[in-house]
Image: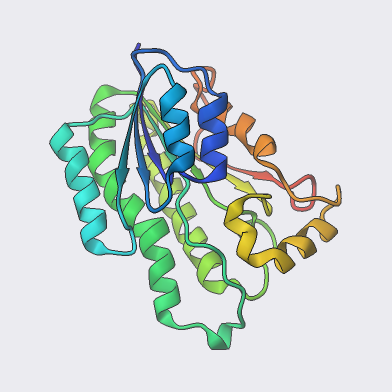
């Protein structure tokens, strides 16, 4: 059976790690959302045996969200697999210095965009009686949240709550919806917050941050045909720092 992937945030290092390690078939199709530099995605598409269509959309903008959802609808694109990895870079600052706009921007990029995308895709997936959804959350929703990251943490909790509710509603439709919550991952996403990344590595039981290679195998399992019964869970990947 041909697989139809919808990937949100396809230029992230985690997604590119997954794309380059997955075994693709000629009849697979990937609809990949991105915003900004897509060199890594272009490099993957050039060597992939299946078709990979890149679509740019700015999820900070309501118009950007709407145009992307309209494109899915116009294509009548019914994904069999959805991978969601979309967030604004983390900014560490005291709560008293944050503005509501910080919250609104994180909510738009992480939650509102995915809410609108799922409203388009899940009813179609439900009719097909199959589908898998995986979203990268964060270990900030497991245990004690980090200090100075309230807008980021709040949006992750909102995203997790939405996806748990969706998992419950669509379980009878044979749709598995799961989340993965790694601790700090060594990627370009954290390049502008090196001090926080260094502190996270110091406090980790293994003395290092997670790598893309630590996260990708969990994504692969949750999106694989082998996963027929796991749904509604949030899997922490923290080397034992947080259970």
> What x and y, as percent, mark residue 149?
59, 71
Q: Where is residue 58 in the image (x, y as percent from the top left)?
A: 32, 57
Task: Examine the rendered structure and indicate whether residue 10 appears above or below residue 61.
Answer: above
User: Which residue lies at the image location 52% right of the left edge and 25% below the top edge?
Assistant: 229
Res 235 seen here: yes
Q: What colour-coding does the image apply?
A: rainbow
Residue at screen point 25% across, 29% down = 78
Please count the marks in the image: 0
**Left or right of 88 in this view: 93:** right
Residue in view at x 28 percent, y 64 percent: 61
Q: Measuring from the top left, give residue 193's x and y in whole percent.
A: 65, 66
Q: Which residue is drawn at 34% across and 64% down?
A: 60
Q: Position of residue 144 (x, y in %)?
A: 69, 65
Q: Can residue 230 be seen in this view?
A: no
Q: Which corner quadrant of the image does residue 4 belong to?
A: top left
Q: Which of 141 and 29 is in front in this view?
A: 29
Picture quarter with the N terminus: top left
Left or right of 74 in this view: 141: right
When asked about the image quadrant of residue 59, the answer is bottom left
Q: Residue furthest bottom?
A: 96
């Amino acid at each position: 059976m041909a697989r139809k992937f919808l990937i949100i945030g396809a230029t992230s290092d985690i997604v590119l790690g997954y794309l380059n390690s997955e075994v693709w078939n000629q009849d697979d199709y990937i609809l990949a959302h991105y915003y900004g530099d897509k060199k890594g995605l272009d490099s993957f598409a050039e060597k992939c045996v299946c078709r990979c269509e890149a679509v740019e959309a700015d999820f900070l903008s309501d118009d950007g969200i709407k145009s992307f959802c309209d494109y899915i609808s116009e294509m009548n694109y019914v994904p069999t697999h959805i991978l969601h990895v979309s967030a604004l870079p983390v900014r560490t600052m005291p709560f008293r210095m944050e503005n509501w706009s910080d919250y609104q921007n994180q909510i738009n990029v992480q939650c509102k965009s995915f809410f609108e995308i799922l409203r388009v895709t899940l009813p179609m997936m439900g009719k097909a009686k199959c589908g898998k959804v995986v979203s990268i959350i964060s270990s900030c929703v497991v245990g004690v949240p980090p200090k100075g990251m309230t807008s980021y943490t709040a949006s992750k909790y909102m995203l997790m709550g939405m996806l748990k509710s969706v998992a419950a509603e669509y379980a009878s439709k044979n749709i598995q919806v799961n989340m993965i919550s790694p601790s700090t991952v060594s990627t370009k996403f954290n390049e502008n917050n090196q001090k926080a990344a260094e502190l996270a590595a110091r406090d980790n039981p293994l003395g290092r941050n997670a790598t893309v290679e630590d996260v990708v195998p969990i994504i692969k399992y949750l999106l694989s045909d082998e996963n027929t019964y796991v749904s509604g869970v949030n899997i922490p990947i923290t080397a034992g720092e947080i259970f």
